[in-house]
Each structure stands twice: as C-alpha cells, then as structure tokens.
Image (spheres, grey):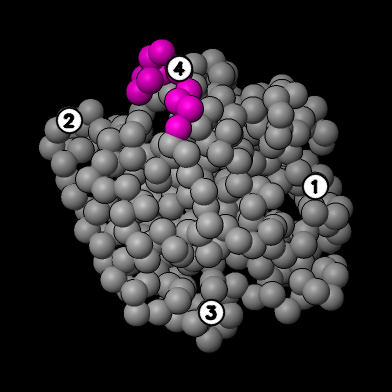
Amino acid sequence: MALGQLVNGKWTTEWTERNEKGQFQRMSTQFRQWITADGSSGFKAESGRYHLYISLGCPWAHRTVLLWKLKGLENIISLSIVDPVISEQGWQFSDYAGSIRDTVNNADYLWQVYVKSNPTYTGRVTVPILWDKQTNQIVNNESRQIIQMFNSEFNEFLDSEFQDIDFYAPHLRDEIDRIIDDIYQPINNGVYRCGFATSQVAYDEAVTELFQALEKYEDLLGQQKYLCGTQITLADWCLFTTLFRFDLAYYGLFKCNLKRLIDFPNLWNHCCDLYQYAEAQSVCSIDHVKRLYYAGLPELNPSRIVPKGPAIAFG
C-alpha cells in the first residue's frame, strides 16, 4: 500500500503531506461546488441525481454518511463504500463485508472517479465524494460542506419525520462554525499530526495541542450537554467521528496515549450518547476502522496485524 496521489490524471505513489520539519500537513480539498434547494448554484437538489462515495473507516467520510442516515437520505442519494484497506492504487471497491461497489461509474479504484470528473486532476484521492450523475462530475469532496448540504438542501424530498431535524440551526450557525474551526486542527486533524509526524518536535507539538484541546472540551461538556449548549449540532457529529476512533486506533497506532478517551468521563459520555442514535450505530463499523488503520497503514504497522482489542462498549 502507498499513500499516493494523482499527478495530471496519472496514479503515482508520490505522497507529499509532510514538510521538512516532519510535520503532517493535510492538502486542501479541491472540489467545492454546492448543491442548493433552488438550484441557484448550478446544482439543484433532486432525488436520485447524486451519489456519495465514502469509507466507513475514514472519520471525514464518516461525517457525511452519518448525516446521510440521520437526515433520511438513503432513498434520495445513492451510496458506495470502499474497501477498508487502502491498496497500492489507493481506495478500492470490493465485496468486503460492509462495502458497496461503485454502481454509478463502475470504477475499481476511487482515482478513476476523480479522473472521470477531471482527466488532468492533480492531488490526493480522498473520500468523501459527492458525485452528480447528471453532469458526470464531482460536485464536492469537502466533508464539512457536504454535511451542511445534507442537513438543509434536500428537505423537500424527506419523509416527514426527518424534515424538522436540523443540526445547523440558523441561530446557532456562528457558534457551530466557531467550534468546528476550533476542534479541527488540534483534535480532528491533530490525531493525524501525531500519527504521521516524522520528528520528535513535530509529534510533541501535536500531542500537546491535542490533549490540551481534549481537556478544554472535557471541561465544556461538564457544564453543558452538547458543544453548542442544549441542542445537538453538526459540531457534535464532527467531534464524534474522532472520539469514536480514539481508543480503537489513535491511542495505540497514532501514539495519542497520554490518556484514553474513556479516561475523559464527559467526552466518553458524549461519544456514547451520540452512538445511541440508531441511525449513527448503523454506519459505525469497528471492523472497518481497525482494518483501515492497522492493515492499511504498513508505514505505521508493518506487520498489518489487526489487534483483537480493545473491547469497547459504546454505551
């Protein structure tokens, strides 16, 4: 396996997300078009028009499939789930349990979807992808924007039980955005900054910032039920996907081991509380998470042995 990328539409094993100081630096996503209910963006929300590509192991993609389930979009937006283990050609489609092949573009590898959208694309091949079947192109591959679209833009097609569910309420949006910004670098991306650091200085900096931020939100959740007060929001789901993986993979493989998540009672309870949503549980795969990290990153785990533990009951 190689964490590769496309260069002018050609797959290569080149990977450049580290700087000379050994710090992990995530590349920005490049597809940032919007689907809107009124179609003013050029991409109108329609039932059956769009397709979502995700990995159940990846926390960024996990955000999007959580909203897909929580908002009742299963019959409106179709879905493909890649194999949990990244191959020599990146994310691949297979018949592994819990995976769903590409029924839209019939691709064997995700990079083929990127090239179909842009034959000269240069950059990382990442999940999630929101694909437009009508124009045969990637609309968006930025998880934060996709969950906002899923929250609001397809409401007219939803069953009545889902129409009033709003995780991005207008009166809370500034606070939601502020917290998503605040947790991104030290926590969501921070675990990767720890795991992929190649110098002691880079690792020490990342792990210190990670646990300072975790302590901050441990304190906050001791004062209120959710990150923005009494109402569950997109900010909670953005934190959840990192918390869900913390003791499963980040604590051990990524050396985020000052404390386990379960040693933070408020963060642990928050994670378990969100896990109780039946829709959330249905797209939380411990198997895919562990296989992605332990079998799919030989740079960090050359043996590719997937550990039996830890034994975790999320509530």
Residue 112 screen position, x and y as percent: 67, 26
Identify the mark at residue 231; answer none if there is no mark: 3
Tell me which segment is drawn in magenta: 298-309
For disc 4, the marked residue is: 304
Q: Earlier in the sequence, mark 3 or mark 4?
A: 3
**Dot 4: element:** loop
Q: Earlier in the sequence, mark 1 or mark 2?
A: 1
Depth check: give the residue in front, 261 or 192: 261
Magenta residues: mostly which secondary structure?
loop
Indicate whether 85 appears above or below 43.
above
Q: Earlier in the sequence, mark 1 or mark 3?
A: 1
Q: Amino acid at mark 4?
A: Arg
Q: Which residue is pictured at 43% across the width and 36% down the height?
A: 310
Residue 136 screen position, x and y as percent: 78, 41
**Dot 2: element:** loop
Identify the mark at residue 78; answer none if there is no mark: 1
